[in-house]
């Protein structure tokens, strides 16, 4: 029996923070992943696991996501990449969307910030593997249907339940910007750009030199 037969699987094509072109901190809000390697390499593969609440994100993608979420907020980073947050800041976080199987699935801050006995943790954890392990955090607020009537084409359906505040699940196009092109947003030059953005959009003035700097010394981490 192949690996695929043991799990409910899909592929993540991209991510988005919030519903605008830019996040509250000025970051590009959406990006896509390279999935051309195919499921045999588990590249950006999604494994659904209803036994966990956390969302394990491939390490490279996790650093970008977490950096954009916690930038400018109070947090502590642990050796394993986990992040604790101020519970008072929950309402200052934006919704996170995953483009899975061509559909945008929504996570509200209350879904991805986990309160354990008064200590809040970001529900996204870097995964050394190159696959997503997605638990109940993403499924919250949805009525899910696991359809295995055709095992070769097993499907999971999502629809907001009657008391959910989540928007309807909708098919979506992959974002236009690859995550590799957004590494410059994790440099000091983007901090300057984000300030100037309040005056006028000088994207290309900062992108080119920041891209060169990032290629040499790499981007910042959270």
Image (spheres, helix red, strand yellow):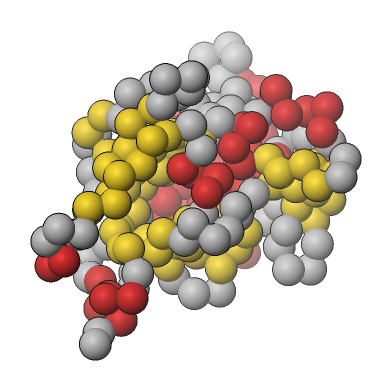
Q: How many marks?
A: 0
Quarter location, residue 11: bottom left
Instruction: Look at the image and tell me whether residue 2 can be seen.
Output: yes
Above or below, comparing residue 52 to residue 195 in the picture: below
Q: Nearer the viewer, residue 194 or 158?
A: 158
| Front residue of this view, candidates 66 and 57 | 57
| Residue found at the very far right of the displayed protein | 118
Position above or below: 51 against 4: above
Judge left or right: residue 188 versus residue 201: right
To which quarter of the image does residue 192 belong? top right
Q: 86 above or below 8?
A: above
Determine the residue positioned at 22% across, 52% down: 147
Depth order, front residue of 194/85 = 85
Residue 77 drawn at (x, y percent): 80, 56
Q: Is residue 139 above or below residue 146?
A: above
Q: Residue furthest bottom?
A: 1
| Spot occupied by residue 80 in the image (x, y as percentages of width and height) | 73, 68
Horizontal and vertical percent for residue 200?
52, 14
The residue lying at 71 percent from left, 62 percent from top is 81
Q: In the image, what residue occupies the spot 71% across and 44% down?
A: 114
What residue is rendered at 40% in x and 64% in y? 47
Mark yes or no: residue 13 visible. Answer: no
* Quadrant assignment for the N terminus: bottom left
């Amino acid at each position: 029996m192949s690996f695929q037969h043991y799990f409910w699987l899909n592929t993540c094509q991209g991510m988005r923070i919030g519903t605008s072109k830019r996040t509250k901190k000025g970051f590009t809000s959406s990006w896509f992943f390279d999935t051309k390697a195919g499921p045999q390499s588990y590249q950006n593969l999604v494994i659904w696991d209803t036994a966990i609440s956390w969302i394990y994100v491939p390490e490279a993608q996790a650093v970008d996501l977490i950096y954009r979420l916690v930038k400018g907020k109070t947090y502590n980073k642990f050796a394993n990449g986990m992040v604790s947050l101020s519970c008072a800041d929950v309402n200052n976080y934006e919704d996170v969307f995953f483009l899975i199987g061509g559909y945008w699935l929504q996570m509200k801050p209350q879904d991805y910030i986990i309160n354990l006995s008064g200590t809040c943790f970001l529900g996204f954890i870097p995964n050394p593997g190159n696959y997503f392990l997605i638990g109940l955090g993403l499924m919250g607020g949805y009525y899910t249907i696991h359809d295995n009537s055709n095992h070769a084409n097993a499907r999971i359906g999502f629809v907001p339940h009657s008391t959910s505040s989540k928007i309807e699940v909708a098919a979506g196009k992959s974002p236009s910007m690859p995550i590799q092109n957004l590494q410059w947003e994790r440099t000091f030059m983007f901090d300057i750009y984000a300030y100037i953005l309040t005056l006028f959009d000088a994207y290309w003035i900062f992108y080119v030199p920041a891209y060169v700097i990032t290629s040499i010394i790499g981007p910042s981490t959270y």
